[in-house]
Image (cartoon, rainbow, N blue to C red):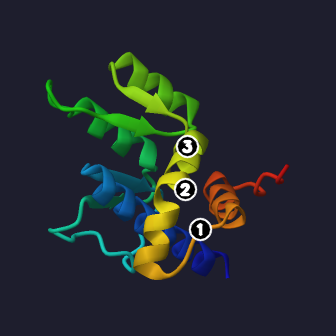
Amino acid sequence: VLERDLEAARRMLIDRLRIHADNMNVDITVVFDGSDKRIPQDESSSPIRVFFSTSPEKADPIIKRLISDKKKNESLAVITSDNEIGHYAKCCGIQVVSSQHFANEISKQTSDETQKKTGQIMTRDELNEWMGLFKNQEPPSQE
C-alpha cells in the first residue's frame, strides 16, 4: 500500500510541477531515491526530467552532480529541505528554496490552472499529505 501511495504522490507531484513549469516557462529536474519504472522518465516535449537513484546510491549524490554540472550562465534553484544539500548548493552559489515554501507557492500558483486542466484542485490536506510522504513523517497539522 505504501509503495502505491508513494507512486501516486510522485505522480501528483510531477503533474503539479509540469503545470508550474509550463506557467513559468522553466525546466524542472526531479531526483527521487530508488527506481520506479512506472513514472515516465523520458518525455522529450516535457519540461520535467525525472531521475531515480539506483541502490545503494541515494538521490543526494545525483543532486550534487547536477549542481556541480551547472553551466556558468545557467539559472538554477534547488528546492530542498535537506540541510546538507542546501548547504552544498549555497556554497556553489545556487539559490536554495525550502520545500515547504515552494510547495506553498506552487499550490497558490497552480490551483486555478490545475482546476482548468484536470477539474481538480490540490487541497491543503493533499499538499500536507504528500509533503509528509516525502519527508517520511506525518503531515503537519492544520492551524
- The answer for how far apart the CA atoms under marks 2 and 1 are is 7 Å
Residue ID at (48%, 23%): 87
Q: Amino acid at mark 2?
A: Ser
Q: Quadrant of residue 65?
A: top left
Quarter that holds the N terminus: bottom right
**Number of disc labels:** 3
Q: Which residue is mark 3?
A: 99
Say which element carries label 3: helix
- Residue 64, compared with residue 108, is above or below; it is above
- Residue closer to the observer: 6 or 94: 94
Q: Which residue is mark 1?
A: 122
Residue ID at (44%, 59%): 55
Q: Amino acid at mark 1?
A: Met
Closest to the camera, between mark 2 and mark 3, is: 2
Task: Give the x, y percent position of residue 31.
Answer: 39, 53
Q: Which mark is residue 104?
A: none
> Is residue 54 at least partly visible in the picture?
no
> Is residue 77 at least partly visible in the picture?
yes
Residue ID at (45%, 55%): 56
Q: Amino acid at mark 3?
A: Ser
The earlier-in-sequence mark between 2 and 3 is: 3
Say which element carries label 1: loop
Residue ID at (44%, 42%): 60
Q: Which residue is mark 2?
A: 107
Task: Give the x, y percent position of residue 83.
Answer: 57, 29
The earlier-in-sequence mark between 1 and 3 is: 3
- Residue closer to the observer: 59 or 74: 74
Within 10 angstroms of label 2, few (less than 14), some, or many (20 or more) residues? Answer: some
